[in-house]
Image (tube, rainbow, N blue to C red):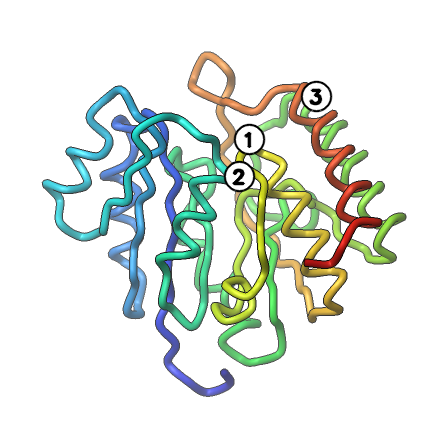
């Protein structure tokens, strides 16, 4: 993909994000490339889907009931057509202004996968919830031990992939286990994975954060399962 002008598919999994979804579309529209924006409405009970449809800048894919972030991302991947596929959360914890530097290794053709990292570099960071921070560090360490790598932030929500690569990987996780599953499967393929420092504007539970300590235990199980299970 070096020196090309790739199309970028942006998958936005959304569950009850009416407060921020139009702002996400506004910020994505400021980016300097052709975008295919796929908002996957995961059983929202608010006006998320209606706002996106009225806005007209994104395609809406609907789940009639809430199936989880992993299921929403898998729906978006299956519908994507871009040379690059990136996951953008709908809550603005991650700023679309970081996408140009996140995608640069892919655009140069030196990477197959690029992860943002909240734990390296000097970008703006809202103070992390302590137990989330500790859990993220532990899960990244476990990933590195199991897969012989040096990822600093496995659970980060900003992940970008060559389109043909991500569409070729069979994924099964419906919930937040998507993050360790996709990490395990790309690492077992021996891909060129880069990390790029990004900013982080984290939310508290009162502000709508959804991931919990239970998801951390699920992630441990997923990392072990996908390390020693079939590669497909």
The residue labelled by disc 1 is 126
Q: How many other residues sit within 10 Å of disc 1, few (<14), some (14-19) or many (≥20)?
A: few
Above or below residue 178? Residue 210 is above
Question: Which element carries disc 1, helix, strand or loop?
Answer: loop
Image coords of residue 61 (percent x, y): 28, 44
Q: Residue 130 shows which numbered tag?
A: 3
Between residues 137 and 39, which one lies in front from this camera angle? 39
- Label 3: which secondary element: helix
Between 197 and 174, the one lying in front of the other is 174
Q: Is residue 197 left or right of residue 223?
A: left
The quarter of the displayed image where residue 32 is located: bottom left
**Mark number, residue 221:** none
Seen at 78% across and 41% down, the residue is 225
Is there a contact, CB below 8 Å, between mark 2 and mark 1?
yes
> Would you place residue 37 above or below residue 214 in this image?
below
Q: CA distance from mark 3 to mark 1?
A: 12 Å
Residue at the outermost bottom position: 3
């Amino acid at each position: 993909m070096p020196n090309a002008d790739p199309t970028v598919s942006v998958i936005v999994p959304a569950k009850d994000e009416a407060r921020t979804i139009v702002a996400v579309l506004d910020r994505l529209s400021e980016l300097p490339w052709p975008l295919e924006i796929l908002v996957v409405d995961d059983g929202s009970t608010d006006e998320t889907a209606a706002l996106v449809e009225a806005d007209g800048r994104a395609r809406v894919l609907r789940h009639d009931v809430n199936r989880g972030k992993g299921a929403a991302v898998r729906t978006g991947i299956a519908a994507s057509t871009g040379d690059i596929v990136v996951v953008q959360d709908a809550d603005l914890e991650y700023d679309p202004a970081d996408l140009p530097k996140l995608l640069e290794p892919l655009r140069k053709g030196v990477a197959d996968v690029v992860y943002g990292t909240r734990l390296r570099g000097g970008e703006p960071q809202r103070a992390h919830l302590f137990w989330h921070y500790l859990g993220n560090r532990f899960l990244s360490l476990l990933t590195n031990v199991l897969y012989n790598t040096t990822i600093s932030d496995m659970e980060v929500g900003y992940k970008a992939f060559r389109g043909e690569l991500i569409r070729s990987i069979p994924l099964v996780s419906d919930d937040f286990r998507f993050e360790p599953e996709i990490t395990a499967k790309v690492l077992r393929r021996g891909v060129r994975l880069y990390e790029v420092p990004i900013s982080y504007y984290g939310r508290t539970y009162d502000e709508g954060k959804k991931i919990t300590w239970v998801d951390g235990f699920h992630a441990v199980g997923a990392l072990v399962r996908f390390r020693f299970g079939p590669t497909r």
